[in-house]
Image (spheres, grey):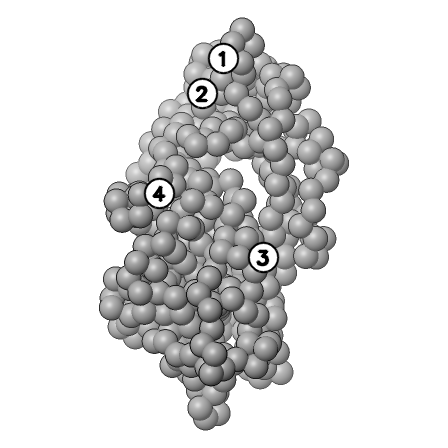
Amino acid sequence: MNPINTNGSDSADVIIVGGGIIGCLTAYYLTQRGIKPIVVEADAIASGASGTSAGWLTPSSHMDDPGLSALSDTTYRLHEELAETLPALTGIDHGYWISSYVRCAMTEGGVALLRDFQTRRGSDGAAMEWLSGEEVRRVNPWITAEVFGGVFSDREPNVDSYRLTMSALQAAEMAGVRVISGRVSGILSSSSDVASGVRLEDGTEVHADNVVLTMGPWAGEAAAWLDRPIPIRPQRGQLVYLAPPEDGEGPGLEVGMTAIEGGSSMIQKRLTDTVVGATSEFVGFDRSITTSARDELLLSASKLSSRVETARISGQTACLRPVSGDDRPYIGPIPGWEGVYMASGHGGHGIHYGPVTAAAITGLIADGASEYDISALDPARAVGPAT
């Protein structure tokens, strides 16, 4: 990280508080509009959920939430663009890969759920193929359980979330963005509720007319700065990684999979080992990994595939997701403040919705309006009047 000015102050066009996927992509998109922000990071870039996410980009995200599902295909297209532009700029392959996936039904009730899912995705223009139990096992040799059937999708991309975040930051830095290390302790205001920058814990002031809060699960800290409630809490998500089979141990995982009735998902990756995930635990800011979570994930996955029981575990990670009060992110200006924006609360979908979130914030700052409809995600629905 670049050093802070020795005179105790610094300035930029925009200050972004938080160096995760949304903060780094916002910095990158702002530079495309000729705006050069400073990113303030309290720990390390991608040190939170952005560095250990499964990186699953499913266009089927939030089908029951029109406000979010309308943005799902949009952010997917932006990911496609980033897969072309960022590696060309930075030389970093962030593992973008359009993989296949099968959602399985273990019960007759699950079949009904999957058939409904298939119909709704078809009405959205994403046709998915119905497979019998026998066809499912031919498509995915790891599935050894007696499944009733499944829905096959060949449009379930994923990325390496750490590499994507670092590539976005590097591209932004190449265009003049600076990163400084420090923990923000307050918002500076030139007059009543008009932002003029931030103050760090060491007393340093960083000045700008616009402040973007992309602090993930730590966004709640800003409630004291803004004198507004911010209902975001951390949720721990643990993942287990499985190494590919060695010679003579059978085929590797060729298609990602999960059971519609609930259970672990298994995601095939291009640059890393197979991901089994994920837990959803409300344990505060505890980022430790646990054997109980590992066993829970593997037991759940083994209901679909007995191969899980003999696979070699190559790693385990834990991250903290930012979960909002209504499971929707907060994207937009903070009510009662001029020049302060929030982009947090995405839960386990920050990587998926990262590009459209960053692009929307960029539009608000550069043009005064977003080209994408983020009205359903307005922070005003929860970040109400002064407390």
**Which numbered disc, 2 or 3, marks the residue closer to the eye?**
2
Residue under numbered circle 4: 92
Q: Residue at x 57, y 81 (%)?
A: 203
- Closer-to-camera residue (278/198): 198
Which callout, 2 or 3, points at the residue further toward the start of the chain? 2
Q: Which residue is mark 2?
A: 254
Compare marks 4 and 1 and give the one earlier in the sequence.
4
Disc 4 or 2, which lies upstream in sequence?
4
Can the viewer see residue 364?
no
Quick check: 156 above or below 92? above
Count neighbours of disc 2 (C-alpha within 10 A) and say few if under 14, some if 14 to 19, many if 20 or more: some
Say whether marks 3 and 4 touch (CB < 8 Å).
no
Rounded to the nearest angstrom, the CA distance separating label 3 from label 4 is: 30 Å
Name the mark on residue 323.
Answer: 3
Secondary structure, mark 4, is: loop
Evaluate if marks 2 and 1 touch, with contact meaning CB atoms under 8 Å apart: yes
Residue 6's spot in the image, x, y percent?
A: 47, 79
- Vertical order, 76 against 296 (above or below): below
On residue 265, which mark appears? none
Across and down, in percent, residue 124 comes to 34, 41
Report the residue marked by disc 1: 251
